[in-house]
Amino acid sequence: MNFWSDNWVGSTSLKEACPHLFKLEKNKRCKAKDRFWRNGGSLGWAWDWHRNPSSAQEMEEWVKIFKLMNAASWKEGTDSWEWLGDKDREFSVSSVKKMLIKNKDVRNNYVMRWCKWVPAKCNIHVWRVEMNRIPTRGALERRNLSIPSIECALCEVGRESADHITTGCFVSTIVWDHISRWCKIAPIYGFSVRDMLEFHKIIKLGEIEKEVFHRIIIIGCWRIWKARNEKVFEGKEVKVEEIIGDIKVLGFLWFNKRSKYRSVDWLKWYKFDFM
Ligand SMILES: [Zn+2]
């Protein structure tokens, strides 16, 4: 064990904790045992400096080393590694796993149902939105990234966040209002992405309609974010009717090609009538 380079006492290596003393050390690769002598029960130092420490910084660091050594416990024998993640100090993959999940409280994590006939890009997007893991301007500002504005790129009024883009934004409000009328249900009100993903559970619709409505919400979230990105990165104007049209057309395409209900024609889809 290297006295200066290995992190064997304190929270860092002694080289980092005491850089001025390290400069004075003659043998920078010396072992820990080279710097101690033991006589019976007493322990002494065996320094080897280019010159004795004398400056205020050097003396300060020397005191620091003494304090660290006094706080440490000593035993005879050769050096060995110990795994601190387990009470037996034995390394094992299961103890790593236990350590990783030990302090993670996952009880409040939302379990998102993967929707088979909706493409992975939409499912993944909504999964990330629910966890607030999309690069909205609000999220970028929180990470101290320099951005020209934190205003929502779609409505240019609210602070841009995952919840705002999905539920609070003027653009998404119009989209959801249209979707609720198309699906013949009461207006959709949600305060968070999770509300939107749970909404299908409380509406009065048949089984197929409920399933379609839920998928439409997922496709809608993805399409609204796509419109936002097209405006930010390509300067494309946001057209709500285009967003709504895409949600319906893509929804029909994916429903017809990928779901088990393939007999539904466009007219039925257009009228939201699956009987
Ligand atoms: Zn907005």
Image (cartoon, grey):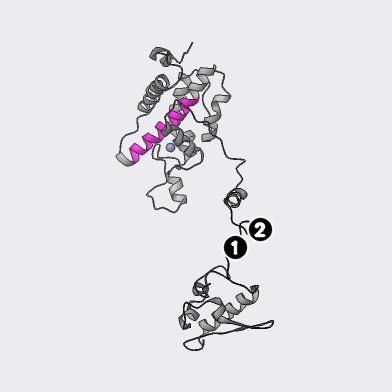
Residue type at numbered disc 1:
Glu
Say which of 14 and 26 sits in front: 26
Does ligand 1 reach within 8 Å of label 2's beta carbon? no
- Residue that numbered label 1 is attached to: 82
Q: Name the mark on residue 225.
A: none
- As drawn, 59 above or below 190: below
Crowdedness of circle 2 by 10 Å Cα count: few (<14), some, many (20+)?
few
Question: In the current view of this chain or complex, which residue is farthest to the front?
Answer: 78
The reply to whether the residue tagged 1 has its Cβ within 8 angstroms of ligand 1 is no
Taking the view exactly as shown, the residue that stands out farthest to the top is: 275
> Residue placed at 42% from the left, 40% from the top?
157
For label 2, the residue is: 88
The local secondary structure at tag 2 comes to loop
Q: Residue placed farthest to the right in the image?
A: 41
Rounded to the nearest angstrom, the CA distance separating label 1 from label 2 is 9 Å
Q: Picture coordinates of residue 137 (x, y %)?
A: 42, 45
Residue in front for this viewpoint, 248 or 85:
85
- SS for dot 1: loop
Q: Position of residue 99 (x, y in %)?
A: 60, 52
Residue 180, image x, y percentages: 48, 22
In this view, 92 is above or below 47: above
Crowdedness of circle 1 by 10 Å Cα count: few (<14), some, many (20+)? few
Question: In the rendered structure, which segment of residues is drawn in magenta?
Answer: 214-232
Reply yes or no: does residue 141 show up in magenta.
no
Sooner in the amino-acid sequence: mark 1 or mark 2: 1
Q: Is residue 229 magenta?
A: yes
